[in-house]
Image (tube, rainbow, N blue to C red):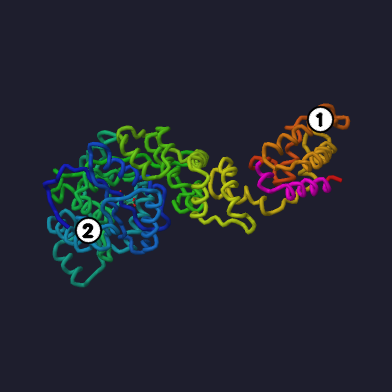
Amino acid sequence: MRETDARELKVRTRVAPSPTGDPHVATAYAALINACFAHAPGNDGAFVLRIEDTDRARSTEASEAAIFASLRWLGITWDEGPDVGGTHAPYRQSERLPVYAEHARRLLAAGQAFACFCTPERLEEMRVAQRAAHEPPHYDGHCLQLSSEQIARNEREALPRVVRLKVPREGSCVFDDMLRGRIEIEWRTVDMQVLVKSDGFPTYHLANVVDDHLMEITHVIRGEEWISSTPKHVLLYEYFGWAGSMPRFCHFPLLRNPDKSKLSKRKNPTSILHYRERGFLPEALLHFLGTLVDGRNDEALLACTTSRELVARMSDCFDLARIPLGGPVFDLEKLLWLNGQHLRRHTPQQVLAILEAWGYEWPQGVAPAQRERIARLAMDRVRTLEEFGPLVAFFTNRPDPSRAELELPELPASIAREALEIALPALAQDEQWHAAGIGALLKSAVAAHHWNGSGNVRFRDVVRTYYVAVTGSPTSVPLFDAMEILGKTESLRRLATALERLH
Ligand code: GLU
């Protein structure tokens, strides 16, 4: 660790997730913006991953490991971090406690912070009174009045205490935001924030400012929910004498649900792991997050088949100033669409490998030689890897359609039966059993048939029955190809079974 006021000009950004719960898509979003900005042309900077695990009750090792794994899965890498090291190590706040303690002492000694011995009961009474008076909850400054003798006595008696930030009551804090320009917040609305908790652990505010300074972060780029905390941070930079090297602030808009509320688990899955498990491709999720950053729909991103390529391309044309202030909407439909698009950028052979790496297990009975052919057909029809299994299950699970499913919704019931009756002898003659031949035979059988009292029936009127008979569903992979893969005996057997159903 080193402390310096003579900062190099090199851009240094960071993302600072707390390892609580599942890794959140908002963390990936912030990481993407910070990584792209650090590596944008001309910045030639470094991107740091710092783990903010000062909440002892909620932080877990498993959650930290999941952050690393899910960001890596997405293709986001960091130049410095707990797992890769770096010149400003350690990067895990729980390993930096003496640093925060020393900085808290500095503030106390300078009278810029104060010890607060208020009991939880007193604080609760205070909050109740404030609520009754329709005041926003805030610390009332009670312990600011304590004499040094009282403080010394309380400390001798080892009364539990926290350290709070002394905040001016007059005037306002003014700071500049790279996206929003000048922001002014009145000091009287800023709470006397706890900086050190009674267990001796720092809160986010103290640890975050101390680390951003010591890690020489030049740009603090984070979600807009932190705007109201920024005055506390600005004050800390001033108290520590670091105002001259304060990082620049940029608060980007939060991800939103389609109804514009803040992205929440209840309305949209928020865990990166969820998307991996459901069979989204990392490059598609990353591309999607990229479109949310600046609303740009860059065709060239679609051509990227790896997320590494995508990050490199996004960094190359990254411009922080283009982030719009309207909340970007996390539209699952759009993500599904993009996923399908990215999937189809791969060859069938690659899709096979992706599916198997994701954990797809072929049912017994699908010969390895058939797998690539099936993948080729199905990849045009699925949006996620998860949709693949159900779509191709009919290859091994013989469908058992009901009469109602086989009948045609807009034609007399007898037409479906006739359609099957003419298909069987027509196909029985086919020796080649190739998709094109199967299609031609079926179509000419339908065209040549004299339909019982129904006038002209077209192939597209009856194809639904063939689909249901062979695949179990009126929409599936291309029918003639599916029949070719199934083979003549199996295909005819399915058509014959369906015909029996209609008698
Ligand atoms: N630990 C904070 C979080 O979880 C970091 C906020 C910041 O970037 O300053 O969001």
Q: Is residue 296 above or below residue 267?
A: above
> Label 1: which residue?
448
> What is the x, y in percent for residue 441?
75, 36
Please report the residue visible at 28 percent of the width from the left and 55 percent of the height from the top: 81
Q: Earlier in the sequence, mark 2 or mark 1?
A: 2
Alpha-carbon distance for marks 2 and 1?
Answer: 79 Å
On screen, 460 above or below 55?
above
Amino acid identity at mark 2: Ala
Point out the stretch of residues depicted in magenta.
481-501
Q: Residue furthest front?
A: 431
Image point (16%, 47%), residue name: 238
Residue 360 is drawn in which quadrant? bottom right
Q: Height in image: 155 above or below 40?
A: below
Front-lying residue, 135 or 42: 42
Q: Percent from the top left, x then y, of residue 214?
A: 18, 53
Q: Main secondary structure of the magenta part?
A: helix
Q: Is residue 436 above or below residue 235?
A: above
- The picture places residue 199, in percent across and down from the top left corner, at 28, 66
Q: Which residue is mark 2?
A: 89
Residue 297 appears in the picture as rendered: no
Residue 451 showing in the rendered view: yes
Residue 496 among magenta residues: yes
Report if residue 479 lies within the magenta region: no
Q: Callout 1: 10 Å neighbours few (<14), some, many (20+)? A: few
Disc number at residue 12? Answer: none
**Front-most of residues 368 and 137:** 368
Amino acid type at image mark 1: Ala
Where, quadrant-wise, is the N terminus in this rendering?
Answer: bottom left
Q: Disc 2 beta carbon < 8 A from ligand 1?
A: no
Which SS class for mark 2?
Answer: loop
